[in-house]
Image (cartoon, helix red, strand yellow):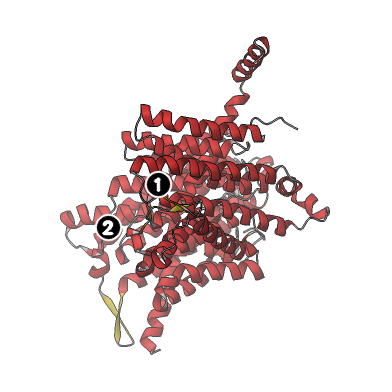
Amino acid sequence: MRREIGNNIRSIVIVAVIAGLLYPVISSIMPGWEVMLTYGIILAIAALGFNLLFNYTGLLSFGHAAFVGLGAYAVGLSVKYIGLRILEVQVLIGVLLSALLALIVGFIAVRYRGIFFAILMLVTAQILWGFYVKFYHITGGTDGIRIPRPTLFFIYDTTGLGYHAFNMVYHYYALLWFTVLAIIMWYIVNSPFGYTLRVIKDAETRAVALGVNVDRYRLLALVISAIYAGIAGALYAPINRLVTPDLAYWTLSGKIVFMSILGGTMYFLGPIIGALTYVYLETIAQRITIYWYLILGITIIAIMFFMPRGLLGLTELEGFKKMARLFSALRLQFKL
Amino acid sequence: MSLDTLARYILDTFFFASLISLIVSGLNIIYGVMRIVNLAHASLFTLGAYTVAWITANYIVKIFGSNLILLLVLPLTIAVIVTVLVSLVMVTPLLRYSYGKGEAFQLIVTFALLIIFEELFQIVWGRMPLVANDAFFAMGTVNLFGSPYPLYKVFVIIVAFLIILALWLLTYRTYLGLLLRATSMDSEMVQALGANVIRLIVVAIITASLLAGLGGALYVPTASVALGLSLDVLIVAFVGLVIGGLGSFIGSLIGALIVSIFRTFSIYFFPELELVILFTVALIVLIFKPEGIGGGKGW
């Protein structure tokens, strides 16, 4: 089997540590750009969920925004109607709702692959989006719901914190979620369950012949994937301070697809690297031009045709390998 | 339900079915020849609609006044030409080079194309909906059991019927149609027998684009055209495809009709639940008849 770069827990921890260390650095060098890092690691959670379906199960979803939106609205509605501000409980509500939705839709959708699955998920997301927009007396319509500062870890009320202090605290809070979830995901994809999913993707007939209940495995993969997207949505709400129907719109699903293929869907770290790169690409592009989605679409097509392995695929180029060999030789030399 | 409401309901259903069948049959032609479901196909419909709305409001009415024949023919022709040209530049090369690259690849590429089109529409025509209902009002109404019914919708039904008839003749009564049908069944064999499959693919895409652009052009006098139309149309067309079965000519027409019955019903009685109803219909069909009404048999 091909040795895959970054498919180990150490790499996940390294990425998390870098994301943690970079935050104060960016905020001192380029104030205002550090928030993107928080968005990036939150979106990375959703992209990890997407990739469990896409790379490991072979199901392409154009509707992951449905779960992101559900997670975000779980936070928004629970604040608005029952005054709940303990974020962990709100995340739990988002997880339960996402899992429930995934079970309902997935019950039928996982029997199909390709276009049918992709569009059924897309329609699911559009239905929810329509609900958020049309039932404005409940959801606030396109104005959305304002999210007050949450209470973290059940006791730590962040209301009194200043803007920057809160962002900083929240970054490390989100980073904690990210690290734990990424490690769990690593165990999932490298467990017998994960390998069964890969068999289903590569040789469905063989999996059936081996006695695997293909639909049940796919359904479980969809539910896990939905839970990840739901958590991402719930974590997204407080840092964004506003929950709008845009979080369930099909363009967000497109962005999640884009992040994953940008980083490289074949790699475990791909969606993570993709999400972190994506938020900065988007920010830079939006400062230069207002036609961000145009660039996004063209870039997707360019990646698909010319760089199908994504950014991490670059590590397999000869030059990079030489550098890596040189690096490890140096490391041996100096006994680092 | 009184007689005129019923007749209105039936005619509205047929009107909508006419538009949807233009898209679904185009999707089907491309799927048949290339095994690609082109997600950006609905964008060509929207492109046709935007073009008509824009030139009618800005040029045709100002230059020619409300001459009915010009209002009908001129925008329609221009829209179809624009759609086919854009399709030749943007859609055809992408589809042609996505040919045979795997379904996930094709879906992502055409999805990206959908995003690109959506942004282009916003750049060119802005966020506000465009309206050009001059032709709709210029045609007047017809008496339908005592209440007026817009003649324009009847006109669309007739035009779409003629187009579908022509398409049927093309696929079942000409040599080109024979080649297209043969490709939909076994493209390798067609290639081995000496036909140029790539050329057939281009012909199929152009035909499909023409149908989509025409559909959009016919649609616009009855309603406004706004961002997000592509996705709505795509979803309705997809449900039609699910019902009718991928790759079946007659099946897709029946699918378009059935999806229109449900859509018109939901628009009449539960406008908030339109998507939910369509989604449920698609799921029910997928449970009980996953291959659709005419699916799996080729053309």
B94 or B70, which lies in front?
B94
Residue displayed at 34% across by 43% down = A163
Let me know if marks 2 and 1 both belong to one chain. yes
B90 left or right, relative to A110: left
Q: CA distance from mark 2 to mark 1?
A: 17 Å
Q: Position of residue A64 (x, y in %)?
A: 52, 53
Tag of residue A36 = none
Q: Amino acid at mark 1?
A: Phe
Disc 1 target residue: B117
Secondary structure at numbered mark 1: helix
B292 left or right, relative to B232: right
Q: Amino acid at mark 2?
A: Leu
A79 left or right, relative to A143: right
Q: Position of residue B152 (x, y in %)?
A: 31, 70
Disc 2 target residue: B130
A131 or B39, which lies in front?
A131
Residue displayed at 57% across by 49% down = B36
Secondary structure at numbered mark 2: loop
Q: Is residue A284 above or below residue B222?
A: above
Residue displayed at 48% across by 74% down = B261
- Residue A276 visible in the displayed image: yes
B221 or A241, which lies in front?
A241
Query: Crowding near pointer 2: few (<14 within 10 Å), some, many (20+)?
Result: many
Task: Using the image, name the chain to which the residue with label 1 belongs.
Answer: B
Q: Residue furthest front?
A: A155
Task: Using the image, name the chain to which the residue with label 2 belongs.
Answer: B
Q: Is residue A271 above or below residue B271?
A: above
